[in-house]
Image (spheres, rainbow, N blue to C red):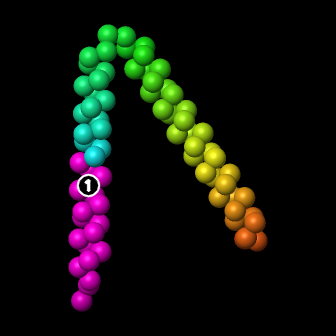
Amino acid sequence: MMEWIPIVLIAFKVLVLGTGMFFAIKWHYDQGKTLKDKRAVARAGGKVVAIFVLSLLGLMLVTFLFARMLGLDLTSS
Protein backbone atom coordinates (compact mmCIF):
# COMPACT_ATOMS: atom_id res chain seq x y z
CA MET A 1 0.00 0.00 0.00
CA MET A 2 1.31 3.41 -0.95
CA GLU A 3 2.01 5.96 1.74
CA TRP A 4 -0.36 8.95 1.67
CA ILE A 5 1.99 11.53 3.22
CA PRO A 6 4.06 12.20 0.04
CA ILE A 7 0.88 12.53 -2.01
CA VAL A 8 -0.61 15.07 0.40
CA LEU A 9 2.63 17.04 0.74
CA ILE A 10 3.23 17.17 -3.03
CA ALA A 11 -0.37 18.25 -3.63
CA PHE A 12 0.02 20.97 -0.97
CA LYS A 13 3.29 22.14 -2.52
CA VAL A 14 1.71 22.35 -5.99
CA LEU A 15 -1.27 24.25 -4.57
CA VAL A 16 0.89 26.76 -2.68
CA LEU A 17 3.32 27.34 -5.56
CA GLY A 18 0.47 27.59 -8.08
CA THR A 19 -1.35 30.15 -5.94
CA GLY A 20 1.84 32.15 -5.45
CA MET A 21 2.59 32.13 -9.18
CA PHE A 22 -0.96 33.25 -9.99
CA PHE A 23 -0.82 36.22 -7.65
CA ALA A 24 2.73 37.15 -8.75
CA ILE A 25 1.70 37.19 -12.40
CA LYS A 26 -1.50 39.11 -11.58
CA TRP A 27 0.44 41.70 -9.56
CA HIS A 28 3.01 42.22 -12.32
CA TYR A 29 0.27 42.48 -14.94
CA ASP A 30 -1.56 45.10 -12.87
CA GLN A 31 1.67 47.03 -12.33
CA GLY A 32 2.34 47.01 -16.07
CA LYS A 33 -1.10 48.44 -16.80
CA THR A 34 -0.66 51.31 -14.35
CA LEU A 35 2.78 52.38 -15.58
CA LYS A 36 2.75 54.86 -18.41
CA ASP A 37 6.32 54.16 -19.49
CA LYS A 38 6.43 50.66 -20.99
CA ARG A 39 10.20 50.96 -21.41
CA ALA A 40 10.57 50.96 -17.64
CA VAL A 41 8.70 47.68 -17.45
CA ALA A 42 10.87 46.16 -20.18
CA ARG A 43 14.03 47.47 -18.50
CA ALA A 44 12.99 46.02 -15.14
CA GLY A 45 12.21 42.68 -16.80
CA GLY A 46 15.61 42.68 -18.45
CA LYS A 47 17.30 43.33 -15.11
CA VAL A 48 15.43 40.45 -13.51
CA VAL A 49 16.42 38.09 -16.32
CA ALA A 50 20.06 39.22 -16.13
CA ILE A 51 20.16 38.72 -12.35
CA PHE A 52 18.59 35.27 -12.72
CA VAL A 53 21.09 34.18 -15.38
CA LEU A 54 24.05 35.48 -13.38
CA SER A 55 22.76 33.74 -10.26
CA LEU A 56 22.33 30.50 -12.19
CA LEU A 57 25.86 30.70 -13.59
CA GLY A 58 27.25 31.45 -10.11
CA LEU A 59 25.40 28.49 -8.64
CA MET A 60 26.75 26.22 -11.38
CA LEU A 61 30.30 27.44 -10.72
CA VAL A 62 29.98 26.87 -6.96
CA THR A 63 28.50 23.42 -7.57
CA PHE A 64 31.35 22.36 -9.87
CA LEU A 65 33.98 23.76 -7.51
CA PHE A 66 32.39 21.96 -4.55
CA ALA A 67 32.17 18.71 -6.51
CA ARG A 68 35.81 19.01 -7.54
CA MET A 69 36.78 19.77 -3.94
CA LEU A 70 35.05 16.55 -2.88
CA GLY A 71 36.99 14.65 -5.51
CA LEU A 72 34.07 13.73 -7.75
CA ASP A 73 34.86 12.78 -11.35
CA LEU A 74 33.21 15.39 -13.60
CA THR A 75 34.48 14.10 -16.94
CA SER A 76 31.93 12.63 -19.31
CA SER A 77 32.83 9.22 -20.64
Q: How crowded is mark 1: few (under 14 residues within 10 Å), some or many (20 or more)?
A: few
Residue at 24% of width from left, 63% of height from top? 12
| Magenta span contains residue 12 | yes
Decide: is 41 above or below 57. above
Amino acid type, callout 1: Val
Measured as percent of width and height from the top left, residue 2 is found at 26, 84
**Displayed quadrant of residue 72:** bottom right
Residue at 27% of width from left, 32% of height from top? 27
Decide: is 42 above or below 68. above
**Which secondary structure dominates the residues rendered in magenta?**
helix
Q: Can residue 73 be seen in this view?
A: no
Q: Can residue 13 be seen in this view?
A: yes
Residue at far bottom of view: 1
- First to last magenta residue range: 1-19
Q: In the picture provided, is 15 more to the left or to the right than 55?
A: left
Measured as percent of width and height from the top left, residue 53 is found at 56, 39
